[in-house]
Amino acid sequence: MRNTHVYIMTNKPMGILYIGVTADLPTRISAHRSGTGSAFCRKWDLKRLVHAEPFDRIDEAIVREKALKKWNRVWKLRLISEENPEWADLAERFNA
């Protein structure tokens, strides 16, 4: 089962982006929404999950997370828009 994810949170379509990695996506999303996930998400009110990529191994996910963080903003926006054109909150798909 692929429990490990690289994910992107935002506050609104085309808004501020946060890229993270976790072995428990539903719990991590809940933490972000309650304000305990990260100071950055709390500061910018990032509560909408707009992208999630599953991985079998945490080390693979960490490599992808680091790569995404080096991408320029346009590439990140395109990644999200191509897979989630409405920038819908995907949290329900993960029971979060």
Image (spheres, helix red, strand yellow):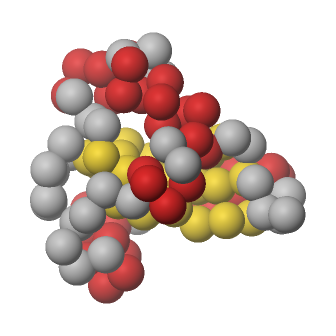
Q: Is residue 83 visible?
A: yes
Query: In the image, 28: left or right of 83?
Result: right
Q: Is residue 35 above or below residue 6?
A: above
Q: Is residue 18 above or below residue 61?
A: above
Residue 51 location (% of width, % of height): 42, 63
Q: Residue at x 49, y 61 (%)?
A: 93
Residue 59 location (% of width, % of height): 82, 53
Front one among 37 and 92 = 92
Question: Which quadrant of the view contains residue 53?
Answer: bottom right
Front one among 50 and 90 = 90
Q: Residue at x 36, y 17 (%)?
A: 35
Q: Is residue 42 above or below residue 30?
A: above
Q: Residue at x 30, y 37 (%)?
A: 47
Q: Residue furthest bottom?
A: 82
Q: Is residue 32 above or below residue 70?
A: above
Tell how many labels.
0
Q: Residue at x 80, y 51 (%)?
A: 58
Q: Is residue 8 visible?
A: no
Query: In the image, 69: left or right of 80?
Result: right
Question: Which quadrant of the view contains residue 79?
Answer: bottom left
Query: In the image, 94: left or right of 10?
Result: right
Query: In the image, 34: left or right of 62?
Result: left
Front one among 52 and 1 = 1
Question: In the rendered image, which quarter contains the N terminus?
Answer: bottom right
